[in-house]
Amino acid sequence: MKTSLSYGHYYDYDELKAALEGFARQYPGLCTLESNCVTEKGREQFVMTLTNKDAGDALSKPGWYLDGNIHAGEVTASMVALHFIDTLLTGYAGDEQIRRLLDRFTVYVIPRVSPDGAEVYLHSPAHLRSADRADHPKAGGLFPTDLDGDGVIRSMRVPSPYGAWKKDPDDPSRLCLRSPSDTEGDFFDLYAEGLWEDDDTDEDNLQPKKPDWSLDFNRNFPFGWYPAPRQPGAGDYPLSNPECKALADFVIAHPNIGGASIGHTSGGLLLYPPGTMPSAKAAPQDLKVLREIAAMGQEELGYVPLNIFDSFLSDQENYDSGAFDDWCYQCRGIPAYTVEYWDLPGKAGVPFPWGSKEPESTAQQLQRFEACRAWVRENAPQYNLDWIPWEHPQLGPVEIGGLQSKFTLQNPPEAFLEAECQKASRFHLRFLQAMPRLTVDALSAKALGGGIYEIRATVGNLGYLPTNLTELARSLKLNDPVKVRIDGAALLSGKAEEELGDLEGYSATRLSFHGNPGTMSRAKARKSVCWLIRAKPGDRVTVKASQSKAGTAEQSLLLPSE
């Protein structure tokens, strides 16, 4: 997979901006860089539109959407998005598949939804959800602080006879749970490296402080939105964050978007909607399509496909709400996936049992963490610190240590970043090709005498997805009909512009596996239309088909002699 940039580190705002501007200068015929919004800190949420402009206007082609970094710390997703831009532009000249894709389709990429939050994440020890903006701050409790000044917030081991932890006698750097029979020995509590906001510390109730920067952009979208405290971080009202409103406005302003890949970390998951109700309540054909596209992702990424509501949510009554993927699917009818890049537990050989209804024991969870830490010590030792003594200004002697979680648990160490990007680009190339795409399958003219001709056209959808994308889009009345127009002659019968309704994609073909496999019924992917016109031999007649999600197609012919 040919690219031109380096993917051995994470780009901050200035480097990302320079890379995008460089592509826009180098490939003016293939891409356009625009500002989708300006944040409160004056940074731009960039959007790159990629298509071969000589082969048609961007909105006249089927569209596909990719974003990343709606959560500040999920910087892998912005690098994945940049890598896909790089793959398409660098590969266009020499890769026939990429050339066809940019000739036929339009790709919209917003690499970093939250540039303010990502900048804080990359240039400070702080962890934050989406942006460095106060969200109903509350005083009191432990606030994470880099006590030893190494630029990382790790963990603290605080000695206490009441603690639930102990040291492994064979390896004091490892954590052990105190068993019910452990009554003698040295025990401790485990907290984030930090300070207590109130000096009058209650050591029996050392609770984390509610983060001042607790806004969660992926809880701020209109579908299923709930306010706090039902949904922490949701904002004061739907789309109250300008970054979120800009995403929703962009999707609405680009009606050709037929699929979306929304980038997050971590877990190694391909999550598909619905996320607000059981999948059994969704249209069966929609679920078939969502699962088969997710299966492609599993092939390329090795990630686990899961329905959000059925298998990912731990609380199906007070479920996570206001998510962008739910809004895309349940308000716009767009097949949308949340892709959780990077899977450290899987790398460490102790994958998380996603989808299991059986709760894990604390011992199993600790085993997974220690396996992850062992992997980091071997593969990225710079991100592990064995415990060191420290004099805490409030608690006295403690120990500081553990993982630098930003680039181990949440994002891959830099040496593993490019491989993650490459896998994602392979999936995105395949996902893009599933979009509906119109063709004028056949066009004929029959001379009837006296300057009268019968013109017959057959219009088809060559894509996997139907022109209406989903059954839900049809129920929402978002299924624009396929329209067919004839130009170049006086019309005697029929309309200058005929409506053909929806055209199925080959996803609707019914298969049989009784005996030898076969086709029971082919998808209704083609429809014909007929006109009577008055014209002269040699006149040119053009038929053009169009639909918002499936693009445009046209064909012309010269009328034969009578």
Image (cartoon, rainbow, N blue to C red):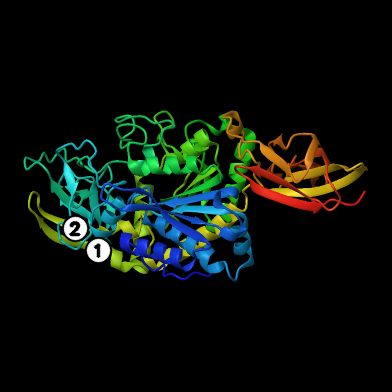
- Residue 385: mark: 1
- For residue 236, side relative to residue 430 (left or right): left
Q: Are marks 2 and 1 in contact (CB under 8 Å)?
A: yes
Residue 401 lies, with reference to residue 275, above or below; the image says below
Say if residue 76 shows up in the picture.
Answer: yes
The residue closer to the viewer here, 270 or 18, is: 18
Where residue 383 sits: x, y (%)? 29, 64
Q: Judge whether 430 appears above or below 499 on screen.
A: below
Q: Quadrant of residue 255?
A: top right
Amino acid on which disc 1 is placed: Leu
Q: Is residue 522 left or right of residue 185?
A: right
Secondary structure at numbered mark 1? strand
Name the mark on residue 353.
none
Q: Residue at x 19, y 41 (%)?
A: 209
Callout 2: SS:
strand
> What residue is at 56 percent from the left and 53 percent from the top?
106
Whole-percent x, y for residue 351 in the image: 45, 53
Classify residue 35 as left or right of residue 285.
Answer: left
**For the N terminus, which image quadrant?**
bottom right
User: Which residue is at the front of the view, 284 or 317?
Assistant: 284
State how many labels appear: 2
Classify mark 2: residues with Cα within 10 Å, few (<14), some (14-19) or many (20+).
Answer: many
Residue 529 visible, this orientation: no
Horizontal side of residue 67 vs 507, given as left or right:
left
Q: Earlier in the sequence, mark 2 or mark 1?
A: 1
Residue 43 x %, y %: 30, 53
Q: Which residue has dot 2 on it?
A: 400
Marks 2 and 1 sit apart, C-alpha to C-alpha, by: 8 Å
Q: Mark 2 is on which residue type?
A: Ile
